[in-house]
Image: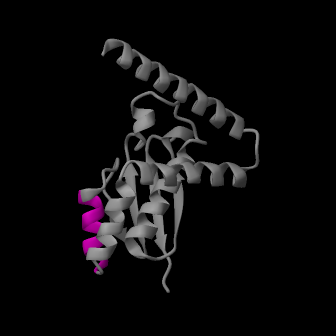
Amino acid sequence: MLDELDEKTRLLKRTGELLNSIIKGLDKVDLETKQKIMELCGEACARSDGDLKIAKRIAEESADEEEILARVNRDIPWCGTWTRRENTIQTVCTRCGCPLVRNEVVNLTGTFCYCSRGWVKKIFETAWKKPIDVELEKSIGRGDKTCKFVVYIQQQ
């Protein structure tokens, strides 16, 4: 059992090093490419951790936007509480929302923050069944004291 744990720990460390190298390499490409790649990573995270299934269930069971928001806050773990502000939904996080960063698997960088943006986009598009835009207004990875995400739900 100990050897199996050691092997899993080594693989996790190797995966983290690999991701850190990829992220460092992304700093050499244009911003649009960097954002697209990292946002795809965030979408993959939403799928793999089960949050996307929860968002789909919320969308199937709720039509009221206030109820959807309450359920997202209750059922999908995040680093801050989502609140409605006029035509947007916003959150402020005092710590990084990424479990890979919090558990020191990968380094926190401004580039890596686009992964969280992709996660937020996928969760809210799924729960609202509408296209959305996400602005990362502040980012701990870029040197801010907090992260601030602003979700713009497009009216159809």
Residue 58 lies in the magenta stretch: no
Question: Can you say whether 125 is above or below 47 in the image?
Answer: below
Quadrant where the N terminus sits is: top left
Question: Can you say whether 128 is above or below 52 in the image?
Answer: below
Instruction: Give the x, y percent position of residue 124.
Output: 42, 66
Residue at 49% of width from left, 24% of height from top?
11
Quarter location, residue 133: bottom right
Magenta span covers which residues?
Answer: 64-74
Question: Can you say whether 120 is above or below 106 in the image?
Answer: below
Residue at 55% of width from left, 48% of height from top?
41
Q: Does 42 sit left or right of 28 as displayed? A: left
Residue 131 visible within the image = yes
Q: Does 155 sit left or right of 35 as displayed? A: left
Question: Can you say whether 70 is above or below 139 in the image?
Answer: below
The residue furthest bottom is 156
Instruction: Give the x, y percent position of residue 75.
Output: 25, 57
Residue at 30% of width from left, 81% of height from top?
63
Residue at 33% of width from left, 51% of height from top?
80
State the count of labels: 0
The residue furthest top is 3
Instruction: Give the x, y percent position of residue 98.
Output: 43, 41
